[in-house]
Image: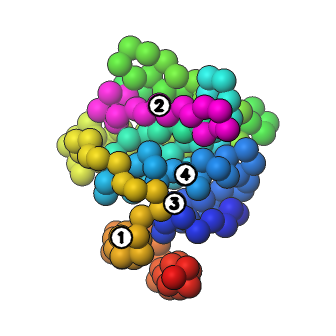
């Protein structure tokens, strides 16, 4: 379990991580790359390209985010552009392969449980998109300021509870943390 105090949706997804080794900075800075109104549904860690980073599944897209001291890498995959997802796991780690717009992206060294759960959720999302459910991709909006204000964090928290993404107990705990940060 990873305990952060960034934003209710990010906090809920991070709490499901067994470890955030090598990606704590990315979790803290994730609001900088999210679009307005974008909600994080799941997180995992992995290696893509030149470094270890964070994989975030949101209500609008799949994002790989690496924030180093000297460089930053963000690659996103719109759900409408993803044609298929492949998961191959070993004893402890695995590889998530995303096929999008004729390209192939491999995110390696993902913890087996996190990677499989994310791959399954992504497959479910894609299956829902194919039949025209609410999983359709929204147009790109302007990025939100880092961290967001308290009112927007509370509004996001209310949306998560209304959508059934968090329990009433999680809602009370996270609301208390937000108010304590004032």
Looking at the image, the residue that sits furthest to the top is 102
Crowding near pointer 3: few (<14 within 10 Å), some, many (20+)?
Answer: many
- Whether residue 145 is visible here, answered yes or no, is yes
Nearer mark to the viewer, of 4 and 2: 4
Quadrant placement of the N terminus = bottom right
Residue at figure coordinates x 49%, y 34% from the top left: 74
- Report the residue marked by disc 2: 75
Mark 2 or mark 1, earlier in chain:
2
Tell me the CA gap for discs 1 and 4: 17 Å
Q: Which type of secondary structure does the marked residue at label 4 adopt?
A: helix
Most foreground residue, 83 or 109: 109
- Report the residue marked by disc 4: 29
Magenta stretch holds residue 37: no
Mark 4 or mark 3, earlier in chain:
3
Q: Position of residue 162 (x, y in %)?
A: 33, 74
Q: Position of residue 159 (x, y in %)?
A: 34, 71
Q: Position of residue 182 (x, y in %)?
A: 51, 82
Circles 2 and 3 in contact, beta carbons < 8 Å: no
Circles 1 and 4 in contact, beta carbons < 8 Å: no
Q: Position of residue 133 (x, y in %)?
A: 23, 48
Mark 4 or mark 2, earlier in chain:
4
Circles 3 and 1 in contact, beta carbons < 8 Å: no
Q: Which type of secondary structure does the marked residue at label 1 adopt?
A: helix
Tell me the CA gap for discs 4 and 2: 15 Å
- Report the residue marked by disc 1: 152
Residue 10, disc: 3
Numbered range of the magenta stretch: 67-82
Crowding near pointer 4: few (<14 within 10 Å), some, many (20+)?
Answer: some
């Amino acid at each position: 379990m990873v305990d952060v105090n960034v934003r209710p949706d990010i906090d809920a997804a991070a709490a499901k991580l067994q470890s955030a080794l090598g990606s704590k900075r990315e979790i803290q800075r994730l609001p900088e790359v999210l679009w307005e109104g974008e909600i994080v549904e799941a997180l995992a860690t992995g290696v893509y390209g030149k470094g270890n980073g964070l994989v975030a599944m949101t209500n609008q897209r799949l994002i790989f985010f690496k924030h180093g001291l000297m460089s930053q890498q963000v690659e996103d995959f719109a759900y409408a552009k993803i044609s298929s997802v492949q998961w191959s796991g070993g004893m402890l780690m695995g590889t998530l392969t995303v096929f999008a717009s004729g390209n192939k992206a491999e995110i390696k060294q993902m913890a087996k449980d996190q990677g499989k759960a994310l791959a399954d959720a992504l497959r479910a999302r894609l299956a829902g998109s194919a039949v025209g459910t609410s999983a359709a991709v929204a147009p790109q909006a302007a990025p939100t300021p880092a961290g967001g204000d308290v009112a927007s964090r509370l509004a996001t928290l209310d949306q998560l509870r209304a959508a059934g993404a968090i329990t009433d107990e999680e809602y009370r705990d996270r609301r208390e943390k937000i108010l304590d940060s004032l």
